[in-house]
Image: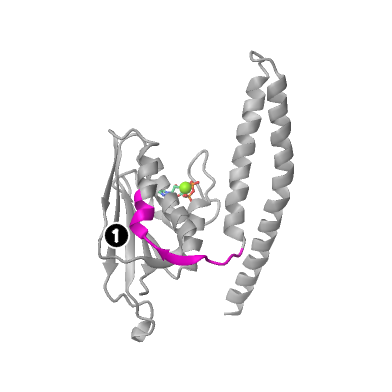
Amino acid sequence: LEEAVRQADRLSTLGALAAGLAHEIKNPLGGIKGAAQLLEMELPDNAELRDCTRVMLKEVQRVNRIVEELLELASPRKLDLTKVNLHKILGDIILLQKRTVDDRRVTFQQHFDPSIPPILADEALLTQLFLNLIKNAVEAVGAVGLIKVSSRVLADYSMTQKGEGRSRMVAIEVSDDGPGILKEQLEHLFTPFYTTKAKGTGLGLAICHKIVAEHRGMIRVDSEPTKGTTFTVMLPLIQ
Ligand code: ADP
Ligand code: MG
């Protein structure tokens, strides 16, 4: 137990450090961006150096994304709880993602249980949670594939033994028929900075994990290499 407390303490110190560092990086980054934009405007259209300014701006944007996600992960915050319609959130995300893919080759299916009532949650955070999962599915299937998003009620799911705190949960599944994940990689997925993508930050699932924990839910992943992957998010249904 002592070790667990020490570990938690180390992590919260690290979190504060990361948040502070992220803030410190944002200002000089803004300076670099401004300078690169100015340079770009001053250069003639055909200048070879334009490639350099383009790279600078792209990389600035990338660092910015990493810093934003790190802040997201490291900073403590209060949930803004309202009654949210899960299906509306999921439907909107799917609609947006559909526009980013060739819809003759990547298919989305949704199977929602209409009996699921609005749940008490932070709408912005849930949007981010499911966006991260669905984006990962889109990236996993690549050019051709099937992505299914479904919801169902888990009847009287008991979070603790003895029926104490027994509550109904809602399960949201995001599954894809992409390449799947090797068994030895599964345990690293939620670790910050773990990524197998050339342009990945490895922070998406760590953020998902945090958001689910903040909502007293659970997240699990099931995957079979070459068959596909399913992420299941379980959230308490309090009425
Ligand atoms: P990123 O997307 O920036 O790599 P994430 O935290 O979102 O970071 O995901 C971490 C890693 O988990 C990915 O790099 C990938 O290897 C794996 N992963 C996540 N979702 C899927 C999926 N649907 N199918 C296959 N691999 C996945
Ligand atoms: Mg991701």
Looking at the picture, does residue 198 appear above or below residue 215? above
Q: Is residue 232 visible?
A: no
| Mark 1 sits near ligand 1, with its Cβ under 8 Å away | no
Quadrant of the image occupied by residue 135:
top left
Q: Which residue is mark 1?
A: 151
Residue 57 magenta-drawn? no
Tell me the residue at 69%/46% (across/down): 26
Q: Nearer the viewer, residue 144 or 33?
A: 33
Quadrant of the image occupied by residue 7:
bottom right
Quadrant of the image occupied by residue 13:
bottom right
**Pointer 1 local density, CA inside 10 Å: few below 14, some 14–19, many at least 20:** many
Helix, strand or loop status at disc 1: strand
78 sits left or right of 132 in the view: right
91 sits left or right of 79 in the view: left
Looking at the picture, does residue 224 appear above or below residue 146? below
- Residue 181 percent location from the top left of the image: 38, 49
- Residue 57 percent location from the top left of the image: 64, 32
236 sits left or right of 59 in the view: left
Identity of the residue furthest to the top in this view = 46
Residue 90 magenta-drawn? yes
Q: Amino acid at mark 1?
A: Ser
Q: Is residue 135 visible?
A: yes
- Residue 34 percent location from the top left of the image: 71, 34
Tell me the residue at 45%/66% (across/down): 82
Quarter of the rendering occupied by the C terminus: bottom left
Looking at the picture, does residue 210 appear above or below residue 56? below
- Residue 99 percent location from the top left of the image: 38, 37
Applied colour scheme: one colour
Which segment is the magenta one?
76-91
Looking at the picture, does residue 38 appear above or below residue 226? above
Quarter of the rendering occupied by the N terminus: bottom right
